[in-house]
Structures are given as structure tokens and as C-alpha cells.
Image (tube, rainbow, N blue to C red):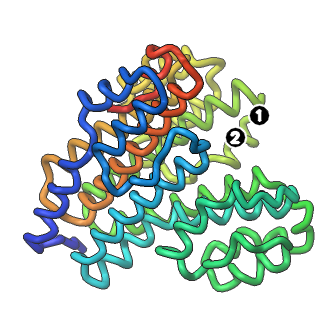
């Protein structure tokens, strides 16, 4: 089944929204600002909606203001979609809902009880994920389980219900990630090849990264690594996956990947995360610019907005802590 967003109004809106994104030259100009006050002034000049930004804001407050802008832009897109398209988009956006859920559960189980830490969640639950609105007020594990009981991801937590107060956080978060990607991949197969390409490629690259990290930093066994991988083979065959699992180090992994479509993705072990993100950015920008406007293009636009926000935060925080410009540049995806 193919779902095309046919409305000319959406076509114009998407182009208009993207034209408001910071260009490569504007990111470079932001990076050249000599202090935090100048950097904030530059951002406010580009995004009048961020009138509340100021140089005294902590990182969490900065993230909250930028997320408000992000959510505002997403909600503008909703106005041009039909019910079925909104349903598909909400499945894609559920990764942000799961981030809210992860943060609250971690906060509750570690007794962090930090309102500042959870402030960003208000933005998402009040405006988009109203099904879990109020989750950031929860202080007990049983309350948490009760609130999410009707959600499809509840089954992940249900496995640990009897030991919920001592549940393994990292294990649950890995299972939530796998749950999301399996669901969105199966959904993408029903619609069009562009969407499948977008989601499938991200899954392949995440599995490669997770194998690398698990072997290098955690010394996981092969079976332990298999447990954390997303059980989907898009362009990475089972044979290649086994070879990656048996590799000794990054260089061995590179040799294996040289026989795949991802042979040019990873250039250096020290920037493996950056290389993955840059490759995904290039896919998103190409699909957005060259393909007809359909639900995949909407996904790409939202991904590009998300990357823009991360770029802004990395530059602002780099300037705040007086990092060398070259070090900040290494984190910017354009």
C-alpha cells in the first residue's frame, strides 16, 4: 500500500519549514560567536519564537525552549494530514514518547525526584502524548505501571512487574528501543520503499554501532550482544552479522563492512557515532529534496528538525564551556 500526501498546501508548507532551517553557513556563523550572549542573540534573530532564550539558561532550560519550537513545527504539519497519515506519523513520533517514559521510569526507580530533570516531558505530554500526560508527576513504580497499562509498550514493563522496584533499567531501555524499531520497520514495509529504506538503514547502522560498543566497552559475549540487537536484517545479511559478531576490533569490522553497502560509512574509530549520524542525515536530506512529498518526506523533515536542534545545543553548550571551535565543529551534522 502506498500513501501519498497529495495536498499542494503541505508541499508548500514543508518547503517553507525547511527553508527556515539554519543553513551550513548560518551554523558556521553561530559557531563564530565569541560568547554565549552573542550566540543566543543570533539564535533569537533566526527564530523569533524563541524570545524567552537568554544566556543565563541552563542546558535543560535551553532544551525545553528548543523542544517547544520543535513540537510547534510538528503540530503545524498535522494540520495538512488526513487521519491515516496522522496515525502513521504518531507511530514514528512514538520514539519521543518512549524517551519520556524512559526518563520518568529512571527517575522513579533511582529516586532522583528532580522536577528540573523532567521539565522537558511537560512539553511532549501536554501537547502531543496526552495519553500519558501527568507521567512526570509520578513517584512510585506502581503508579507508573498503572498509567501506561493501556499502551502497547506496557508489555515490556510487564515482564518485570514482580521485581519492578529493582528492575534492570538498561535492559528495559534496550527492549523499548527494539520494540520501537521492530514496530516502525513493519509499518514501513506496508507503505513505500522510501520509508523502508529510511528506517531499515537506521536499524542496520544501529546494530553495527551496538556490536562495536558491546565488544569494545562492555566485553559482551556473542550471545549477550545478540540479545541487544534489533532482530531485523535489512541490508545486513545474517552471514555478515555473524562475521561482525566474530570480529576482534574496529579494523576487523571495517573489513567485513567493505563487502556491504555500508563500506563507506565509517571512516575512523574515533568518530564512529558521528559517521553514522552523518550518513543518516545525508539520506534524510536527499529523500526530502528529491522525492515526491509523501509520508516518508514528512518523517525526513522531522528528522532534519531534530538534527538542527541537536546542532544548536552542541554549539551553544560548546560556547558556554569555552570549548575549542574545532572540537565543537566535530559534533555538528550538516
Question: x%, y% of residue 283?
Answer: 29, 41
Nearest the eye: 184 or 75: 75
Marker disc for residue 189: none
CB atoms of marks 2 and 1 within 8 Å: yes
Q: Quadrant of the C terminus?
A: top left
Side of 294 where 162 appears, left or right: right
Q: Earlier in the sequence, mark 2 or mark 1?
A: 1
How far is disc 2 from disc 1 in space, using C-alphas?
6 Å
Q: Secondary structure at mark 1?
A: loop
Question: x%, y% of residue 120?
Answer: 59, 59
Q: Is residue 30 above or below residue 122?
A: above
Question: x%, y% of residue 302?
Answer: 34, 56
For label 1, count other residues whose C-alpha is less than 10 Å away and answer few (under 14), some (14-19) or many (20+).
some
Q: Residue at horizontal 26%, vertical 45%? A: 21
Q: Residue at horizontal 62%, vertical 80%? A: 151
Nearest the eye: 213 or 151: 151
For label 2, count other residues whose C-alpha is less than 10 Å away and answer few (under 14), some (14-19) or many (20+).
some
Question: x%, y% of residue 329?
Answer: 42, 21
Quadrant position of residue 115: bottom right
Task: Please give the residue where the numbered disc 1 appears in the rendered image.
Answer: 220
Task: Please give the residue where the numbered disc 2 appears in the rendered image.
Answer: 225
Quadrant position of residue 297: bottom left
Side of 290 where 186 appears, left or right: right
Q: How many marks?
A: 2
Question: Which residue is at the far left?
Answer: 8
Q: Residue at horizontal 41%, vertical 64%? A: 71
Q: Is residue 274 above or below residue 226?
A: above
Nearest the eye: 196 or 16: 16
Amino acid at each position: 500500500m502506498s500513501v501519498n500526501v497529495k495536498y499542494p498546501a503541505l508541499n508548500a508548507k514543508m518547503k517553507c519549514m525547511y527553508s527556515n532551517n539554519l543553513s551550513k553557513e548560518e551554523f558556521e556563523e553561530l559557531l563564530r560567536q565569541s560568547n554565549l550572549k552573542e550566540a543566543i542573540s543570533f539564535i533569537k534573530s533566526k527564530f523569533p519564537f524563541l524570545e524567552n532564550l537568554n544566556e543565563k539558561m541552563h542546558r535543560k532550560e535551553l532544551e525545553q525552549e528548543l523542544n517547544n519550537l520543535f513540537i510547534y513545527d510538528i503540530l503545524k504539519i498535522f494540520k495538512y494530514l488526513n487521519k491515516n497519515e496522522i496515525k502513521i506519523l504518531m507511530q514514528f513520533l512514538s520514539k519521543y514518547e518512549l524517551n519520556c517514559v524512559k526518563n520518568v521510569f529512571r527517575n522513579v526507580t533511582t529516586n532522583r525526584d528532580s522536577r528540573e530533570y523532567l521539565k522537558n516531558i511537560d512539553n511532549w505530554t501536554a501537547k502531543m502524548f496526552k495519553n500519558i500526560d501527568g507521567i512526570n508527576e509520578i513517584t512510585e513504580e506502581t503508579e507508573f505501571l498503572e498509567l501506561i497499562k493501556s499502551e502497547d509498550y506496557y508489555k515490556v514493563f510487564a515482564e518485570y512487574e514482580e521485581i519492578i522496584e529493582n528492575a534492570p533499567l538498561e535492559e528495559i531501555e534496550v527492549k523499548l528501543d527494539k520494540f520501537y524499531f521492530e514496530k516502525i520497520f513493519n509499518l514501513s514495509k506496508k507503505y513505500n520503499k522510501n520509508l523502508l529504506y529510511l528506517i531499515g538503514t537506521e536499524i542496520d547502522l544501529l546494530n553495527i554501532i551496538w556490536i562495536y560498543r558491546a565488544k569494545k566497552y562492555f566485553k559482551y559475549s556473542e550471545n549477550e550482544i545478540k540479545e541487544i540487537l534489533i532482530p531485523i536484517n535489512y541490508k545486513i545479511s545474517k552471514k555478515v552479522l555473524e562475521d561482525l559478531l566474530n570480529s576482534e576490533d574496529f579494523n576487523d569490522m571495517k573489513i567485513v563492512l567493505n563487502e556491504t553497502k555500508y563500506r563507506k560509512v565509517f571512516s575512523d574509530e574515533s568518530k564512529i557515532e558521528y559517521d553514522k549520524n552523518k550518513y543518516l542525515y545525508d539520506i534524510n536530506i536527499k529523500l526530502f529534496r528529491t522525492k515526491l512529498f509523501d509520508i516518508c518526506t514528512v518523517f525526513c523533515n522531522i528528522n532534519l528538525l531534530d538534527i538542527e536542534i541537536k546542532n544548536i545545543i552542541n554549539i551553544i553548550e560548546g560556547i558556554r564551556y569555552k570549548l575549542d571551535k574545532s572540537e565543537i565543529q566535530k559534533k555538528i551534522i550538516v
